[in-house]
Amino acid sequence: MPILSREKYWILETEHTAYAFGVNAHGLLVHAYWGARLPFAEDYPLPPESGDYASWSGPSHLVPEEYPAHAGAKFVEPCLKTTFADGVRDTVLRFGAAEVVGENELRVTLRDAHYPLTVVLCYRVHEAHDLIERWAEISNTGNTDDASITLERVWSALWHLPWGGQYRLSHLFGRWFEEWQLRRELLQPGVKVKESRRITTSHSANPWFALDRGGADETQGEVWFGVLAWSGNWKLAAEVTEYGATRLGIGVNDWDFAWRLNAGETFTTPASLAGYTAGGFGAASRTLHDYARAQLPHGKTLHPVLYNSWEAVFFDVNEASQMAVAERAAQMGVELFVMDDGWFHGRAIDNAGLGDWWPDERKFPNGLTPLIERVNALGMDFGLWIEPEMVNPDSDLYRAHPDWVIHFPTRARSEMRNQLILNLGRTDVQEYLITLLDKLLAEHNIAFIKWDMNRNVSEPGWPDAPGDARELWVRYVQGVYRVWSTLAARHPRVLWQSCSGGGGRVDYGMLRMVDQFWVSDNTEATARLGIQEGFSQLMPAITMESQVTHMGRPLLSLPFRFHVSMMGVLGISDDLLKWSEADLQTGAEQIAHYKEIRPIVQLGDQYRLLPAQGQDFTAVQYVSQDKAEGVLFAFRVHLPEPARIPPIYLRGLAADARYAIDGFDAVRSGAAWMNTGLRLELGNGESTVRRIRRVE
Ligand code: DGJ
């Protein structure tokens, strides 16, 4: 049983890890243990007592409260902050009840000592995936004539780290065109905050974390790691208290946030998933990858090789040109033909059309059907780009509904890329989008949608909001989820891609709808190596769309660019009408090669053998889950001569099995390839992809 419960004490066990907490003698719900699974239930520590305290703090300041509310004499980062109708801003939570639901879910109810406020702490044990999922449900249990309660902070979880030692936080930062940069920094006393205030997950940070005590690397060491499954404003606060306790709170951002919780209503937080491993950062990533793959709407169906029109012709799409390109794409072995921005009503450049999701009459006088039929006749599926959350002031939609955008009536509406954001918190906006996009999908044979989102918020007003206008941050995201998942449910065959000007909205909240992400608008192959490495910290290769383009000066060889993109879901976005016969031939060969290794890349375990960020020689390996096959990618960006190419030590092979590797005569044991390594000869700007095969 993954949940062991004794008198007000619970142990949640996954295959290799455990998490324990309970009510202490002071009546506080406190954390007791998070780490390796122990042999016996008696091995786990009991909830710590509060101990002595001075007049400078109360008992609950000194213990690792499982879900501290802002109350009493404690000054740590709380999970919950409320204001009651009478102005009281002190939330006193007491244990109420606990219930195990089914095999793997635990619900612990806390109640305020005076007000009709209930907090249910929810835990789901993902036993096989070695992850614990947490979220909270906050209810106003008053009668309908009772006053509302204002929520000002309501986090998903506080993750307590074992006491002792100085923890190091690994996190991701970046910006548009340079997302997914990895940083590791030692935590100091105080609070280290990472957040988004942009209404999306953001390019600049991601709600993913990994904590270690300084000694972990890719292959070994204790790592506590997690994510928040949320696609809007979020906050992560890693706190080291004055007594040296380390904890990490995560949830919806409380910045500019308030939620009016009326009597009878419940606020449910997004979930946070977290895990522990002694196998280093690589094992932490693979744990998340396994879980993510299991969540994908289309499961483990292999994702198709795609063509995308954006880097080829930008907005300049039309029926004749797309048909011509489709011929070439099909000849090369492309399986999915995606038409990007530029196809819809009034769209010539980026200053018009968003909101009017029907084909542009000048570019597609006969609608999209002739092109789709041609693409299908060539043996490919058809995909389309949309940006539903946006509107250009120059559009029929905006002319009809100028009040539908996020705005303050007394302020200018700042445009970015000539566009404004529709307020998806509004149900009328949601209904409009569902109706229009449902029609688009129902009337066309569309197998793939790229859902883009190309600006961040400004003037975050909602003039006629039904509740507190600051609910916008959450209601907007809930609206995005509602529109998207309604369409996904009605059109289950469609594969969805999440894009936000590249990697601006990549998170575990999106996984309920999407199968893959656009990772970055930067497709220059060497930059991409580092970007993809950062992305792989939390997401598996099957979700990572990666395209061969002509970005970068000097332009790297076509095989190098293909090899970079073959580490995820391969795509091409370049003007194939300009490709020579030799290029088309190379492309066809690379695509054929990719199709052979695709199951290993998309469904296998990933090992980051040699780091990419800041390095000029990098290698990544994928191994099928049964360890029968693998594939090694290596890239020499630029090493000055005389070059000292590092040896590559493979990983993840069965130690006693024998393996052959393309380009090497010797058949050696997995242990030998992993312990003595191999050497490759590569020149600057060269790359290689080698199959690894188990030999019976
Ligand atoms: C931003 C995306 O990241 C690009 O791939 C492309 O779809 C453009 N938007 C289209 O406007």
Image: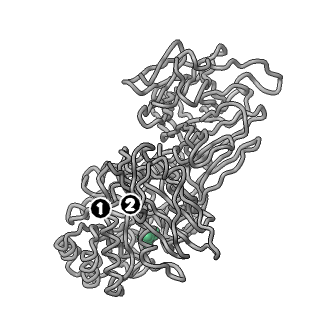
Closer to us: 94 or 125: 125
Find residue 247 and name its label.
Answer: none
Tell which of 312 and 136 is nearer to you: 312
Q: Position of residue 203 (x, y in %)?
A: 55, 61
- Is residue 217 at all visible to an observer of this figure? yes
Residue lying at 41% horizontally and 66% vertically, measured from the top left: 663
Q: Position of residue 200 (x, y in %)?
A: 51, 56
Rendering coords of residue 469 (x, y %):
54, 50
Quarter of the rendering occupied by the N terminus:
top left
Occupied quadrant, residue 304: bottom left
**Residue at mark 2: C-beta within 8 A of ligand 1:** no
Point out the tag, 2 or 1, that comes first from the N-terminus: 1
Tell which of 629 and 423 is nearer to you.
Answer: 629
Q: In the image, is residue 329 above or below residue 644? A: below
Q: Which residue is mark 1?
A: 437
Kindly indicate the quadrant of the structure image that contains residue 180: bottom right
Whether label 1 lies within 8 Å of ligand 1 gets the answer no
Q: Is residue 465 visible?
A: no
User: Label 1 neighbourhood size at 10 Å, few (<14), some (14-19), many (20+)?
Assistant: some
Q: Residue furthest front?
A: 666
Q: Residue furthest right?
A: 55
Describe residue 125's horizontal placement relative to residue 483 as left or right.
Answer: right
The three-letter code of the residue at mark 1 reads: Leu
Q: Amino acid at mark 2?
A: Arg
Give 121 or 189, whichever is nearer the viewer: 189
Which of the labelled discs sits on residue 691, or is there none? Answer: 2
Which residue occupies 22% across, 76% down? 371
Q: Position of residue 531 (x, y in %)?
A: 53, 63
* Residue density around tag 2, few if under 14, some if 14–19, many if 20 or more, within 10 Å: some
- Per the image, label 2 sits on a secondary structure element best described as strand
**Above or below, comparing residue 72 to residue 536 in the picture:** above
Q: Secondary structure at mark 1?
A: helix
